[in-house]
Image (spheres, helix red, strand yellow):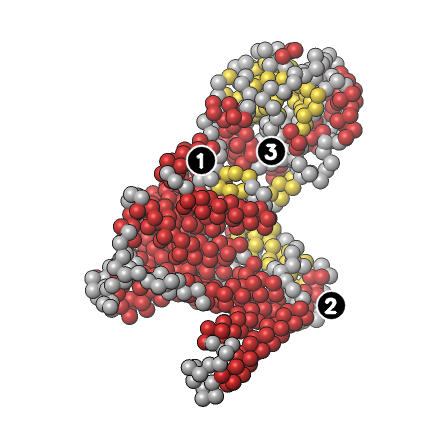
Amino acid sequence: MKPDEGIDEERGAGRSSWREGPTDLRLVPLAAAAWAAAAWAVGAAGRWTAAGVTVCLAGALILLVRGRVRRRRGDPGGGREAAGPGTTPGRRLRATAWAGVLLCAAAGAASAGLHAADLRRGPVPELAREYARARLEVAVTSDPRLTRPKVRGNAMAPVSILLDGEVTRVERSDGSVHRTRTPVLLVVPSGEGREEWLRLLPTTRLRVGARLAPPLRPGESFAAVLKVDGAGPPRIVGPPSALQRTAGNLRAGLREATEKLAPDARALLPGLVVGDTSRIGPELRDAFEATDLTHLLAVSGSNLTVVLLLLIGRPGRAQQVERGGLAPRIGLSLRVTALAGGGLTLAFVVVCRPEPSVLRAAACGLVALLAIGTGRRRSLIPALAAAVLVLVLHDPWLARSYGFLLSVLATGALLTIAPRWSEALCRRGVPGRVAEALGAALAAQAVCAPVVAVFAARVSLVAVPANLFAELAVAPATVCGFATLALATVWMPAAEGLAWVAGWPAGWLARVARTGAALPGAELAWPGGWWGGLALALLTALVVLGARRLPYRGVVGALVAGLLLLVVVRPAPLARWVTGWPPPGWVFAMCQVGQGDAAVLAAGGDSAVVVDAGPDPVPVDRCLRELGVRRVPLVVLTHFHADHVAGLPGVLRGRAVGAIQTTGLEEPPGQAEFVRRTAAAAGVPLIRAEPGERRRIGALEWRVLWPWTGAGGSDASGSSVEGPNDASVTLLVRTAGGLSLLLLGDLEPPAQRALMGVHPGLGPVDVLKVAHHGSAHQDPGLMRAVRPRLALVSAGRDNPYGHPSPRTLEALGAGGARVLRTDRDGAVAVVGAGRDLVAVPGGGPLSPPGLPG
């Protein structure tokens, strides 16, 4: 057979010059055994690991010895043709294969046990168990990264800087000094000196004072968490290595060259090229997660594959007389081309850091290099299995990494399932390139979606089209990005020009992610955990099997695609007809945002006033999209606690916002600064709510009842206003239809009593937004005075605060109010007024009973 008779690279045409044999799976059980054993052993006690290794070695030895004895009995001469009964070559091979599986399992467990033992030796684990303080010398082993902002109760957890490191010297409080080599995680408060910490390079040696603590979960890859004292700049006692300085200069050059790009392109391009995700904000990351495009936020095997394709050409061409790519055009032989590919891979690892994600990307890229060079699929699965085996033995914690599992599954699907599905699509008339891209996207989603469901409890319904559209931009963004990286250190103007070119496809990727995430049905809630993942895997298998056996697959496929499109797009009239949400003519809605507040007052058409924004941008944005709100003349933030203001970016996302009104007491100051910064970035003015202020927008009219004196101080009744809750902006709202609403924010009983003193004529209302998530701290006099017909409580499901309080719910019910709560009823909408007043829970009936008169 001639060398150029490999599989035709034009798989999209459905032609091949010859058929390969079945896929070679012999290395797969070996890699799986090492993987499973390492995953178990990194969290097991040392004695159990030693016992497991011993059992595996003993089992392998027994199988090998029995096989040798049988060979001697059946074939004294050592040949194979005289094998006796029960000693056929097939049986001997099976015994050898099982012995190999046990040996690989022993190797995986032994490697994991030795790595885990390093975390239990020396003074660092002992100090961590005692939560002691010490002075330490630490060698940095990763790039610094920022934690994601999180809301805890009514506060926003401060952003911290995380670094992986290795402790080399420990000085205890008693003055004793110990030498060691122990992996740790450094947590540095983000404050003064933040920029110096973020510029640290791997191999830099630091001297820090810190309190040590054990890892939160067993099986972590570090022995202790070091909570570094203070927030000053790092104290460097040893510079980084020359190799890391070179890599750092290249990365810094890329950041400088992309500085003038649009925000999304400036954030994405360094991540796509070298894994620098420091500029990617939570909003953009959420969009990529919703569309299952997170593999594009950082380096992956596909990035390296694009560069190798540029060098070598399309699959199968390497062995042909007319080779593809740049290599033959610059006179490189096949052997030199292979060495150049390996050199590119090594440079890729150095510049992007030899971290687990980069190592697995390089391994997958090398497997792709084999595919490019040979065009033969039969040898690719053994190559992937060998890469998995080597990586797991090198770093056993990869065995418990969801990212590693997703990488391996996606690569395996692209090598095995995707070509068959592409050929099937070609036979049904789909153009070759489209069939190849669609088959790859479908295969990767089919095998990865169950794993995503395990830890994210969701399924992306837009992942396949999002990946198809993103694929158009990955290659140009990667190639131009790497060219920018190479030019940045020698000719910055040219690098900036290339970065401008690369910014177009990078911006396209961001638009694809944002557009897909903004669709109403982009994500589907799904049970999490392994049972949820197993259920999704079974459902996927049933769908695939059913698709193969269904008659008239084209018609059924078109119907399914149309139905999926309707589910994702959710046209407002259709969604309202199917779900009853939002109800026609709604005038007020309480969004389901977890443990926080977000309310919406309809102002006519697609316009609404938003009162508070909840703790997270995603749910409030989703709520406003479901309600059809595109214009927000005013956002009222009752006070600056995080569970009321942290979701503000979600309100601003894609909407015309006129102004943001706040209370006068700017506490907590960090969260008040967050509001100012967010408003300034969106170009929205901030105004202060004035006591007694009256406003009218569309069908709405309201009056500011509180805080009477603005920021702190004493109110008109002489009562002291203390703390952010008591400074909550309180609104009395009336609609054109005569509906009255009292929105109390988080007022505590002292402020509620003062409110009654300032406004003694405050009478009954139709709707009460119960203060402070329905906590037990309510003023009975206020509840008796306003006597609401409908009381709405915004609280998170299973919240740790006991909200809403049973005592508060009983008091409201005794006063004649119907109580609805977002933790049980979901979002709630109010329709009508007077005797026609109706409350519609988001998950309730289309026509719930009217409220009591």
Q: Amino acid at mark 2?
A: Asp
10 Å neighbourhood of mark 2: few (<14), some, or many (≥20)?
A: few
10 Å neighbourhood of mark 3: few (<14), some, or many (≥20)?
A: many
Which residue is found at the position 29% from the left and 53% from the top? 11
Residue 561 picture location, percent across and down: 41, 36
Q: Mark 2 = which residue?
A: 174
- 852 or 495, which lies in front? 852
Label 3 vs label 1: CA separation? 26 Å
Which residue is found at the position 76% from the left and 27% from the top? 808
Q: Amino acid at mark 3?
A: Val
- 789 or 656, which lies in front? 789
Residue 604 picture location, percent across and down: 51, 17
10 Å neighbourhood of mark 1: few (<14), some, or many (≥20)?
A: some
Q: Where does the N terminus fall, quadrant-wise?
A: bottom left
Label 2 vs label 1: CA separation? 67 Å
Ranked by sequence position, the earlier of labels 2 and 1 is: 2
- 180 or 89, which lies in front? 89
Res. 564 mark? 1
Q: Nearer the viewer, mark 2 or mark 1?
A: 1
Ranked by sequence position, the earlier of labels 2 and 3 is: 2
Which residue is found at the position 70% from the left and 17% from the top? 789
Residue 364 picture location, percent across and down: 42, 60
Which residue is found at the position 54% from the left and 57% from the top? 401
Q: Is residue 749 above or below residue 11?
A: above
Q: Mark 3 = which residue?
A: 593
Total marks drawn? Answer: 3
Q: Nearer the viewer, mark 2 or mark 3?
A: 3
Q: Quadrant of residue 490?
A: bottom left
Residue that lies at the very extreme toward the front in this rendered image: 85
